[in-house]
Amino acid sequence: MIYFPHDNDHQTRRERLIAAVLPVIREWTKALAVVTLFALIMNLFFPRYAVEGRSMEPTLHETDRLFVSNLDIMTRLPQRGEVVILTSPHDGDTVVKRVIGLPGETVEVRGGVVYIDGAALDEPYINEPPRYTGRWVIGEHQYFILGDNRNHSLDSSDYGPIDESIIHGVVKFRWFPFDSLYNFPLPQYR
């Protein structure tokens, strides 16, 4: 029998392989953890949505893809003119609409024009003037939301002001289709 003394400084092939692979596995694990954390944060604070229906035409169209900030709603109140994502009080679906009236205001629709506390609202983004009339007083912590396609939208003109708790995010930009990229600046009302 031949005896080979064990040399403590001498590594076996298996030990050398483990020593070579272990740093690679650690690096890949770190990279995977960073990517996973990034994806979780993006989905939690900046989800993406697909538009269904015609209620926001001409601003948004069926199959548009939107990038939304939930962080905005967590840190501040919605502003007039912002396009928001909310849970419809009518059927519980997730919908996209525009904020028109703020807490404490009175919204009136007559003659195809929206009035806020008696002042006409200039709305170049709507599809056509509304054919309905009505008057709504908005309570504390409530908002009045309308679709840009006023005559083909289920919104506050049908179910009244909504509670701020059902607004989930502010639409920041359309990222698809790629030839229609668009950010959503706040309209400048006169």
Image (spheres, rainbow, N blue to C red):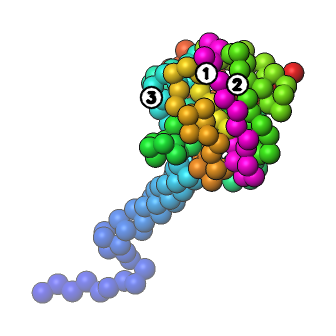
Q: Indicate the quadrant containing the N terminus: top left, top right, bottom left or bottom right.
A: bottom left
Q: Secondary structure at mark 1?
A: loop
Above or below for 38 versus 135: below
Q: Identify residue type, mark 1.
A: Tyr
Above or below for 70 versus 111: below
Q: Rounded to the nearest whole Å, what is the CA distance between mark 1 and mark 3? A: 24 Å
Above or below for 59 versus 138: above
Mark identifier at residue 114: none
Which residue bears the numbered disc 3? 52
Above or below for 180 versus 21: above
Q: Secondary structure at mark 2?
A: strand
Query: What secondary structure prevails in the magenta region?
Result: loop
Residue 151 visible within the image: yes
Instruction: Say left or right for 84 vs 152.
Output: right
- In the image, residue 147 lies at what x, y percent? 59, 27
The span shown in magenta is 128-143
| Mark 1–mark 2 CB contact (< 8 Å) | yes
Residue 103 on the magenta span: no
